[in-house]
Each structure stands twice: as structure tokens, then as C-alpha cells.
Image (tube, rainbow, N blue to C red):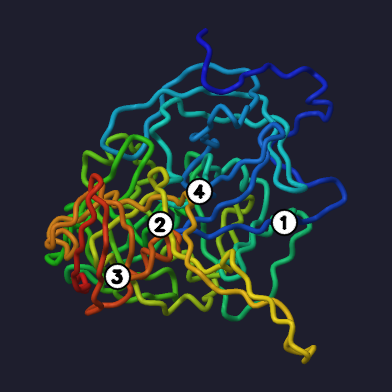
Amino acid sequence: MKTFWVLISLFCAALFSVAAQDGYVIKPGDEDETIRFKFVNNLIIVPVEVNGKELSFILDTGVSVPILFNITDKDSLSMGSFEEIELKGLGEGEPIRAIRSRHNRFKLKNIYNNDQEFYMLLNREINFSPRLGITVHGIIGYDLLKNFIVEINYRKKKLKFNNPEAYRYRKCGACETYRLDLIGNKPFLNASVALGGNEDLPVYLLLDSGSTDAVWLFEDDDEGIHVPELYFEDYMGKGLSGNIYGKRSRLEKFSIGKFMLKDAKVAFPDSVSTKHITFRGNRDGSLGSEILKRFDIVIDYPYERITLRKNGNFNDPFKYNMSGIELQHNGVRIVKELEKRAAAGVTVDDGDDSNSAGVTFTLGDSYSISLEPALEIAEIREGSPAMQVGLKKGDVILSVNGRPAHRYNIQQLSEIINEKAGKKIKLLIDRNGTELKFAFELVKVL
């Protein structure tokens, strides 16, 4: 067996002095545990200890066993027993090599599993952190959720894990509870869409908190699921097997029970990107976080149901990328900035007035040098305002409307360059060491 780029050690029996149990449990004596999360680009990111090492995971209801990636030498992650395998996922590429490891300890505050299996990807190029602007080491889903009734509060950024035997549903006239089918360790629910003149077309969707989109649908003429006349081709994201491309459009309406949303975004991934999907349970597509974040949610895997209640995000508009630019971090760049400081020379005043006597400083100019993340154009949509003025993939953004780009994180900068139709955007970029200026106007898509 070759030596891998992560420290691999077989645990001694002392590490598992607590008897392994079936999945995650809450510390004896507690009935619930609350975990705070970060919400970045419509994704829930939680801290998880893996064999004593704290890492960051995306909570992804579309995944069964945890998957790790972006593990570097400095992480020094230990493992239980392991073997090499292949994994298939969304994307245009081929299956990828991974390590399958058993008998690991995962812990979130007072929630733990002493016998967790996980997969670790061996391809270092698979890394979602540059697109998010923060470090992420993996995705986790069914294994963490299956033993609990989990409350998700997107506005307060809190997850509350409850012991099903002790949990009591609160009376809530504004709440609706629906069936949640667990098929192949993945949750599915019924919804309906209106598109292309088809009113209330029933669809069976994967509940996918790991998708940043609103709705994905798979084209199926037999079921009346087809791309509307108005659409555009676009990059849709990154999957385990590579980039995902397809068509984007809008639904006339999207409904779950009594809850209805108009003009929701919808994406139709191409057949190349979805070739590795196993279509279980007559799946028609996915329901992503662009819609899920509009509710307070109770996910109840033990009793296979989901409860929804509108939150303050419910009526937020569904906005498409109006610039055509997708950003990512790619290394660092040197930033030189003008600052003010006291000059070396001073003047001493020995006057009789004790209130005025003292030292007078003369201000002079100086510069500070720092290393800042380089914000790079990762993808650019064909025919978009940004492409029409000559911007290219790989351009590094130095400033936006006269303000240095490093003053913003990826999410803030993405919001600025996609804020509202008609807004003028001026970019200073670095292209292979040459500074160039570009200007364009944001245009509403569809």
C-alpha cells in the first residue's frame, strides 16, 4: 500500500474506550444539542471533529456517508481501517479515486459517533473552498441526521438536534407537515411546478441542502418536464465528478402543499453532467437551498416527515447572476496601500502656557504592504455583459467601482456585481501582470 498525503494511523483500542453505537447519539443526560452554523452561498457549514481534528463540513441532505476532500499535510488527519475505491457523482468527468475508512470518531459538541465510516477523495483538485471563500473539508448528511429530529433556523443560523423520544412538536397554525420518503438513505418529497403552460405538474424531488440553487429538473417528455422557451446556457456548479453545465429558466410557480412561490429559478442539468446519477424512486430533480432557506424547517428522519413554516426570507426575489461572473479565490497577491502616520521629525513647544506646551507631530505619507486573497474570475457566461466587454476567465479583480477588491469577501463582491439591473460596474483587473479597465451595465436575466 502506497503512502498517502494524509497521516494514516490505525487506532489503538483506547481510542474507542466508549463502546461503538449505531450512529450519532447525544451525550447521556441531554435531550438536545444546538449547533451554530455559517451560511455561505446558500450552504450550511458546520464544525465537526474528526478523530480529534476540527474540520468544516457542508450539511448536505443529498449525501449518505460523509465525504472528505481538501485535506492537506498540515491537517495530520488520522484514520481507522481503510481501502481504496472509486466514487461517482455529479459532473462531466469520470469516477474518482477515494479512500474508504471505517471506525472513526466524529463529534459536534455533545453529539458523537464512535464508529463513523467516511470516504476521502484523493484528487487534490476537488476543492470547493475557493468558490466559497472559506475553508471546507467535506460534506455530511444522512448519517448525521438519521437518529434525530433536526430544527433548522436559517435566520438565526442554528441547528437543533433533538432526541426523537423526548421531542414534542409545538402547536403551530402557520406550519405544514409533509411526508418525507427515505430512499437509498436520501430524502424525497412531493411538490408541483407550473412551466410551459403545464399547471400544477407533480414532481418528485430530492431534498438537497447541498445545492445552492432553487430547483433542478431532469428533462422528461413523457412526464411533461421540458425546458421552457426562455432559457440560457450556463455553468451550474461543481460536482464530485467535475463541472456541471445546463440550461437555466424560471418556473411560473413552485408549490409544496399550500406554500407557493412565483418566478422561482429552475435549472436543467445536461445529460453529461448527470450520467452517474442513480435515479431512484422516479426522481424528477432536486429541491435546493435557494428555496429551503425561505422556511423554518423540522427534518424528521425517524418518522419520515418534514415541517415547514415561512420565515422572513420567503418573499425575497429570485435573482440570477446579472454580470455573468463566477468568482473564486486563487492564491494571494501583494497589495500596496497608502496610509497616514506621524513623520520622524517633531517640534517642541516650550511656551509658558502649560496647555499648549508639548510635542507637535507632522503627518507624512507612507505605504503598507500586505498579502491578500486574489479574487479571480472562475467562470464567465457566454453572451453576458462581462463577456461582451472582453473580461475573461482567469482575470484577477483588483477593484470594483473604485474600491479595492480585497475589502470584500467573495459573497459581498458577488452581491455588488449582481445587485440590480441597470447598475454600472467598473472593474480594474490584472491579466497576466497587465492592469486593464472594464465597464459594463448589469442586465436582468429572464
Camera-nearest label, 1 or 3: 1
Q: Residues within 10 Å of mark 2 (few under 14, many from 20)?
A: many
CA gap, disc 4 and disc 2: 11 Å
At 42% from the left and 54% from the top, the residue drawn is 335
Residue 372 image position (x, y, % from top left): 45, 52
Residue 42, percent across and down?
45, 60
Disc sitting over residue 212 in the figure: 2
Tell me what residue is drawn at x 60 percent, y 66 percent: 153
Q: Nearer the viewer, residue 231 or 326?
A: 326
Q: CA distance from mark 3 to mark 2?
A: 24 Å
Identify the residue at the far right of this view.
Answer: 29
Q: Secondary structure at mark 4?
A: loop
Instruction: Say which amino acid is labelled 1.
Output: Asn
For the residues labelled 1 and 3, the Cα–Cα distance comes to: 35 Å
User: Can residue 110 be spotted in the picture?
Assistant: yes
Point out the tag, 1 or 3, that comes first from the N-terminus: 1
Q: Secondary structure at mark 3?
A: strand
Q: Secondary structure at mark 2?
A: loop
Comparing labels 4 and 1, the label whose residue is closer to the camera: 4
Q: Which numbered disc, 4 or 2, marks the residue that appears first in the sequence? A: 4
The span from disc 1 to disc 2 (Cα, nearest Å) is 26 Å
| Left or right placement of residue 445 versus residue 335 in this view | left
Residue extending furthest bottom?
353
Q: Which residue position holds label 4?
A: 60
- Label 4, label 3: how many angstroms apart (C-alpha)? 28 Å
Q: Quadrant of residue 258?
A: bottom left
Q: Identify which amino acid the numbered label 2 is placed on.
A: Thr
- Which one is in front, 362 or 180? 362
Give the labeled residue for mark 1. Answer: 162
